[in-house]
Image: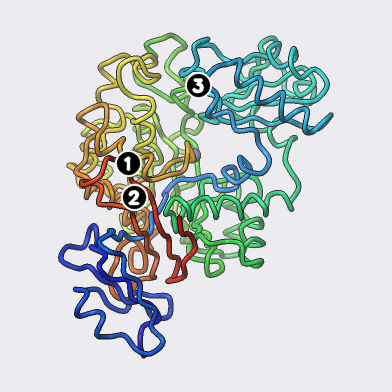
């Protein structure tokens, strides 16, 4: 059988010495020097001369909220680019005029980059949008602000999670109100398709999804319509455990592109919202954060999920939350080959990393966080002070400890080329990785974390032909000029610049 496609004069970024790939039936058939691989061609083989542009395995974004990202394109008002509080309000008001009387849902505001340096509040929203319900989520997803009309739908009493005066809702209270504003199923399928188009344009061919509205049916419907061009590995809310066990659904269950992988559990919140659980107080007030699960509850969850053949992805940001996550896995006596994961893992100690290695736990980290929020004058330094900021997101420590590292974006925003400088050229030395290790964490890392490294994550014979053509070698061009030129999924071109 001759290959259907040969890419040549394409130096492989991470696999040294090779500059050509042959693809047959959607998989890599051969890897080698251009002269050798071109000899395999037959009458029907398509030949693509990449003229020296490098080839890397399709990026694997190991932590996304895929439907949310798609909704940003088709439903939500994207506030992530707002440069001031006033500009955020203007974007919301514009969306309100386009949707009179309907819900306006904003996402991604980040006061830490605004000159006003304060949270949005209820009265800000009321002044601009008095006649329709409005809710706007902070960039970290842990704090929402609502106007008076939206707040009327919130059934929770005033207290820890609800501040009616400011219109602030935290954690579950924010999620509940957001659920009231949920779009129709049809919009969610459109969102899945939009997220997949965006992912392909960024060179992402696989994602691990950490939840969002009706992820499973939305992705499946998009796939059935031929609108999904991304492999999706799903971690469902931990509340789904009983249903999955009841159906005997194990890891790997699904269709060709959409698979159930396991469950997601939260141990703490975020640094932005001061809900990440720390062992010492926040530098700018507001206590030490909070734990959302006890060690025993988490150990029971992990034990039961593992017994059912499911993985657990544990959200733990602060050092106190990370301690709980690791201790729970020790208590549960996890099998290292289950490869349970800790999501974010922003403030681990070296001792905790050594224990993670023994337990086979995967570090699922987001280098874009370091790029965006670490360093002098940035959010992490304000929240934590310079000493803890110097060791936040320590990718280098993780690598030194031998803990498997998977990179992702958490959708803030999606884009490996945007995030990678947070590891390759970061604000703090503890965050620095050699470029090869950083690219590997963004390709092989996610594949390993989802136990799919036998088919995904590098360019080797037998693997699925998920490939990305970059515009230049990352060491030979200024990083800002680096682009994804083409993306192939299973040998099929799904994006070309
Ligand atoms: Zn997330």
Packing grade of label 2 (10 A; few <14, some 14-19, many >=20) is many
**Could you say whether the residue bearing mark 1 is in a helix, strand or loop?**
loop
Residue at 56% x, 46% y: name it.
Answer: 211
Residue 334 is tagged as none
Residue at 26% x, 80% y: name it.
Answer: 38
Residue 297 in view, yes or no: no
Residue designated by label 1:
420
Q: Which of the image's four quarters has the N terminus?
A: bottom left
Nearest to N terminus: mark 2 or mark 1:
1
Q: Nearer the viewer, residue 27 or 360?
A: 27
348 shown above or below 185: above
| Mark 1 CB lies closer than 8 A to ligand 1 | no
Label 2 vs label 1, nearer the camera: 1
Nearest to N terminus: mark 3 or mark 1:
3
Tags 2 and 1 touching, CB below 8 Å: yes
Marks 2 and 1, how far apart in space? 8 Å
Marks 3 and 1, how far apart in space? 25 Å
Residue at 51% x, 30% y: name it.
Answer: 292
Nearest to N terminus: mark 2 or mark 3:
3
Task: From the viewer's perspective, tell me whether residue 244 is left or right of residue 456.
Answer: right
Label 3 vs label 1, nearer the camera: 1
Q: Where does residue 158 sit, x and y in percent of width and height?
A: 69, 15
Residue designated by label 3:
273
248 shown above or below 351: below
214 shown above or below 391: below
Tags 2 and 3 touching, CB below 8 Å: no
């Amino acid at each position: 059988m001759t290959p259907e496609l040969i890419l040549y004069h394409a130096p492989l970024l991470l696999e040294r010495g090779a500059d050509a790939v042959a693809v047959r039936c959607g998989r890599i058939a051969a890897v080698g020097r251009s002269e050798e691989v071109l000899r395999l061609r037959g009458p029907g083989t398509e030949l693509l001369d990449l003229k020296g542009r490098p080839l890397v395995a399709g990026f694997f974004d190991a932590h996304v909220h895929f439907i949310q990202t798609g909704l940003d394109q088709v439903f939500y008002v994207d506030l992530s680019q707002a440069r001031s509080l006033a500009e955020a309000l203007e974007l919301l008001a514009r969306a309100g005029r386009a949707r009179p009387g309907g819900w306006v849902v904003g996402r991604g505001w980040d006061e830490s980059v605004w000159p006003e340096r304060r949270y949005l509040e209820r009265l800000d929203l009321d002044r601009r949008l008095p006649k329709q319900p409005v809710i706007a989520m902070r960039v970290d997803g842990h704090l929402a602000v609502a106007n008076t009309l939206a707040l009327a739908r919130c059934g929770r009493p005033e207290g820890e999670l609800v501040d009616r005066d400011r219109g602030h809702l935290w954690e579950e209270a924010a999620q509940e109100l957001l659920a009231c504003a949920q779009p129709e199923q049809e919009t969610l399928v459109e969102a899945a398709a939009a997220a997949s188009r965006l992912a392909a344009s960024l060179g992402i061919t696989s994602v691990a999804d950490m939840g969002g509205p009706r992820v499973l049916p939305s992705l499946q419907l998009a796939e059935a319509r031929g609108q999904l061009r991304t492999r999706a590995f799903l971690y469902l809310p931990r509340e789904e455990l009983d249903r999955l066990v009841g159906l005997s659904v194990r890891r790997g269950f699904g269709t060709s592109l959409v698979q159930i992988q396991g469950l997601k559990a939260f141990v703490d919140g975020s640094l932005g919202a001061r809900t990440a659980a720390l062992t010492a107080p926040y530098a700018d007030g507001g206590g030490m954060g909070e734990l959302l699960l006890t060690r025993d509850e988490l150990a029971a969850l992990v034990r039961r999920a593992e017994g059912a053949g499911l993985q657990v992805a544990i959200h733990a940001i602060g050092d106190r939350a990370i301690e709980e996550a690791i201790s729970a896995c020790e208590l549960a006596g996890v099998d290292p080959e289950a490869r349970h994961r800790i999501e974010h893992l922003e403030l681990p100690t070296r001792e905790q990393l050594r224990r993670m290695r023994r337990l086979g736990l995967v570090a699922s980290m987001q280098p874009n966080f370091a790029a965006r929020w670490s360093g002098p004058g940035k959010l992490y330094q304000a929240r934590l002070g310079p000493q803890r900021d110097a060791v936040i997101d320590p990718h280098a420590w993780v690598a030194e400890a031998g803990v498997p590292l998977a990179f992702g974006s958490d959708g803030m925003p999606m884009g490996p080329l945007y995030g990678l400088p947070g590891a390759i050229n970061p604000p703090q030395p503890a965050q620095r990785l050699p470029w090869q290790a950083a690219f590997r964490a963004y390709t092989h890392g996610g594949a390993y974390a989802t136990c799919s490294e036998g088919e995904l994550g590098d360019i080797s014979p037998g693997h699925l032909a998920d490939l990305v053509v970059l515009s230049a070698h990352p060491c030979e061009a200024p990083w800002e000029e680096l682009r994804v030129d083409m993306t192939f999924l299973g040998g099929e071109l799904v994006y070309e610049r």
